[in-house]
Amino acid sequence: MIRIIPSLLIYNNTLVKGVKFTNYKNAGNPVTTVLGYQSQKADEISLINLNHYKKEGDFDLKILKKISKVCNTPITFGGAVDSFTKVSQIFSSGADKVYISKYFYKNIKFIDKISSHYGSQSIVGGINLVKIDKDYKLLEDETKKLATRLASGPTNVYGNTKKLLYRSLDNEFEAQLQMEAEMFADCASKPNFKEGVTAFIEKRKACFKVE
């Protein structure tokens, strides 16, 4: 049997959409969107609070309470759920199920406690995977590896690259080229640039310093 379960991302109590977990843009009112899916006979509705993942502000369940008052469709709610207290608050606020990702496979006792108290049907487990070559690996583990690798690299270059990418969305072509030239000049003036070129010539691994 096919079941339709829309998954909605909430940020600052607003519905958002993003690309590859970044560049979130306002996508409307979450309450009216949920009611729209309910009218289209969705089997369940999943709500993920991104503020909780980003650890911004308190554990806010206002939007869940508001939606649960007007929605009869079963609701799954998640977002950095890492304690039984938060689980209890989620269910008290109107959710039918709780979505748990990292702790789903890292803390079995936590899952067992929820299952014993609310039933196994109340838990939705999420496993975030990333495909590297032909293998699937846990996103959290690979993120830590990438962060460690980036921290040992030329941080000034990474910062300038991010600025260029973000500004490219709004810049005219000539303005973007001018900005790129300025950023390149900035990078070339740093010791890490010389180290990178030298390491390339000497065919060795570069030893960058945090700038």
Image (cartoon, grey):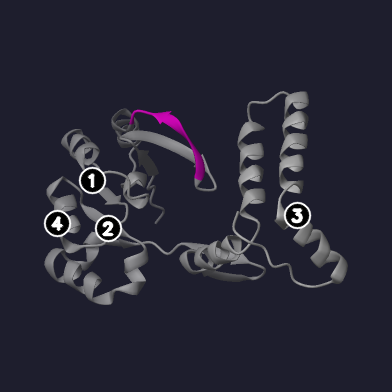
Q: Position of residue 112 (x, y in %)?
A: 21, 74
Circle 3 crowding by C-alpha within 10 Å: few under 14, some 14–19, many from 20: some
Foreground disc of the pair 1, 4: 1
- Decide which of tag 3 and tag 1 comes sooner along the chain: 1
Foreground disc of the pair 3, 4: 3
Q: Which residue is drawn at 24% across and 55% down?
A: 97
* Residue 47 appears in view: no
Residue type at mark 2: give it.
Answer: Val
In the image, farthest residue toward the right: 201
Label number found at residue 148:
none
- Answer whether labels 3 and 1 touch (C-beta < 8 Å): no
State the residue position of label 2. Answer: 81
Q: Where is residue 94 in the image (x, y as percent from the top left)?
A: 16, 45
Q: Where is residue 115 in the image (x, y as percent from the top left)?
A: 19, 69
Foreground disc of the pair 1, 2: 1
Q: Of helix, strand and loop, which one carries label 1?
A: loop
| Alpha carbon separation for disc pair 2 and 3 | 43 Å
State the residue position of label 3. Answer: 193
Q: Which residue is drawn at 36% across and 39% down?
A: 11
| Alpha carbon separation for disc pair 1 and 4 | 16 Å
Label number found at residue 88:
4
| Alpha carbon separation for disc pair 3 and 4 | 53 Å
Q: Quadrant of residue 202?
A: bottom right
- Answer whether labels 4 and 2 touch (C-beta < 8 Å): no
State the residue position of label 1. Answer: 58
* Residue 154 appears in view: yes
